[in-house]
Amino acid sequence: MLSGCYKPKSHFLQAGGSYILALRTQGATATSDYLLTQDTINNAAKVVSSTGNGIEQLAWCYFGAAGKTVFSFSYGTNNVGIGYGINEGGALYEKGRISFERMDCFGKGDDSTLIAIGAPWGGGSYDCQIQLIDANDIRIRKKRLTPLYMWSPLDVLNKWPTSIVVNDNKMYVSFYPLDGGTWNTEYTDTAYVTIFSYPGLDSLTTIKDSRTGPIGLYGNQIGMMKAENGDIYTVSPSSFAAGYTQVTKKSGILRIKNGQQSFDPSYFFDVETASGGAKLLTAAYAGDGLLVARLQLPGTDDINAVWGAFEVTNPICKMAIIDLNNKTVTDIADIPVHGGQYGAQWLVEEGKVYASITSTPAGEARIYAIDPLTATATRAAKIEGLEVPAIYKIK
C-alpha cells in the first residue's frame, strides 16, 4: 500500500512560522515527503514548496502531532520516527528519533503523548502493538501487544485499526476485520470499536453496531471525532474505493455518548441516503455539531476500483458540511471535485478548517479555508507538489 525508499535527509533554508506542513512531491520514479514551516496558509498568493525549503524525510511517511511536537514516521529500509519542534526563529529542529517495527494508526493521548498502533501485516499474527510515545523526550514510553478483538481462539482474521480517540480515561479504537494475506474484507455488516483503559491499555470491551459497516479506512484517516461534550461520532465509509472488497451497509455515522461503553441506540445518521448516494470517507469536527467532510461522489463506487479513494489524482471526491444534530449534508460549491488522500490530517483553527485539495479538473493542488457555518470556502495557499498530507499549528 505504500511506496518509497530510504534516502539521505536533506536540510534547506526554512521560511519560518508556526504552521508545520507535510508536503508530498512526485519525482521521476517515486514520491518524496518534506516537513516545512509557513508563517501563514490562509493566503492564495502563498506557495507551499520544497524548493530550497524544509527538511526532506527519510521515506514515505505518516504524520502525527502531540503538544508542541510534530512527528514523521518513515517507512523505508529502516522505519524511523522523528520528532520536530519549532525554535524561537520559527524554524524546524529535530528533537529526537525512535526506531519502530510498525505504526499504522495514530491519535493524541494528551499534550505530551502520541498514541501509535502497529497493525499485523500480511497475516500470521493477530496482535497489534499499542505504543505510547513521549512527545517531550521522543521515546516509546509504553508498549502493549494485544489483539484488538478475537471472535474465538480459531479466529484467523487481522483487525486493522483505523482511528483512536481518548475520552474519560478510556481509549476507543475502531477497526475492520480483513484477511491479512489477500486484504479481502468478508465482514462489512458491523461497526466495531474496542475500548481500552487509558493510560493502562487494558482491554475493557468491544462494542458492535449492525446499523452500518466498519468504521474508518486504511491509511491513518480520521474515522472518529470527539465533540465538545465528550460524545464520539464515527464514520463508516461502506465503499469499495475506501479499500473494502464488499459493501453491505449504507455509509453513515454512529454516536458513543460521553463516558459510555456502547453505541447510542437512539442515534444513526444515514449519510449515504441524505446525500443522494455519496459515501462519507473522512471528516474533521469543526465545533457546534458540524463536520467538514470528504465524500465520494455518487455513482463512482465500483468493485473494480478498490482503493480508488487513495489516489490523489482520481477526482471522485467532494467536500461538504455535515450537521450532526439536524442530519443534513450541504455541499461546498467553492471546492472542486478532487482526489483522495492517505492520512488526511486537516487543521481546525479559529472557526475554519484547512484541507488539502488536489483537483485534476481544476489543474492545481491547493489548501482551502472552509467556513463550516456557511458551507463556503476560499482559496488558501497553493501547493507545489502532489498534496499536503498534514497541517499543524504549533502555539
Image (cartoon, helix red, strand yellow):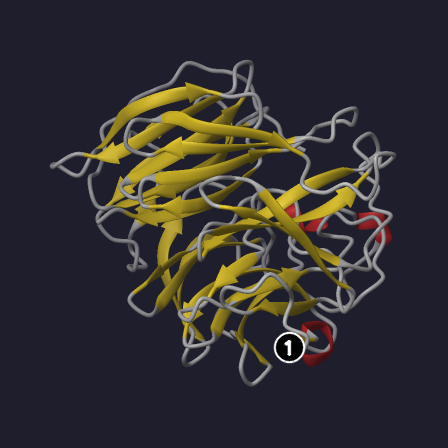
Q: Is residue 395 left or right of residue 141?
A: left
Q: Secondary structure at mark 1?
A: loop
Q: Is residue 305 left or right of residue 346?
A: right
User: Which residue is more in the foreground, 229 or 328?
Assistant: 229
| 360 up-or-down from 83: above or below | below
Name the outermost residue toward the bottom. Answer: 326
Categorize mark 1 by other alpha carbons within 10 Å: few (<14), some (14-19), many (20+).
some
| 372 up-or-down from 151: above or below | below
Q: Residue at horizontal 42%, vertical 68%?
A: 286
Quadrant of res 337? bottom right
Q: Is residue 296 left or right of residue 188?
A: left
- Could you tell me residue 218's position as x and y percent? 65, 44
User: Which residue is more in the foreground, 2 or 194?
Assistant: 194
Question: Which part of the image, by quadrant, shows the N terminus?
Answer: top right
| 192 up-or-down from 202: above or below | below
Residue 114 in sight in this render: yes
Q: Residue at horizontal 76%, vertical 60%?
A: 213
User: Which residue is more in the foreground, 364 or 298?
Assistant: 298
- Could you tell me residue 111's position as x and y percent? 31, 45
Q: Amino acid at mark 1?
A: Tyr
Q: Residue at horizontal 35%, vertical 42%?
A: 66
Residue on which the image places disc 1: 267
- Could you tell me residue 33's position as x and y percent? 45, 31
Residue 54 in sight in this render: no
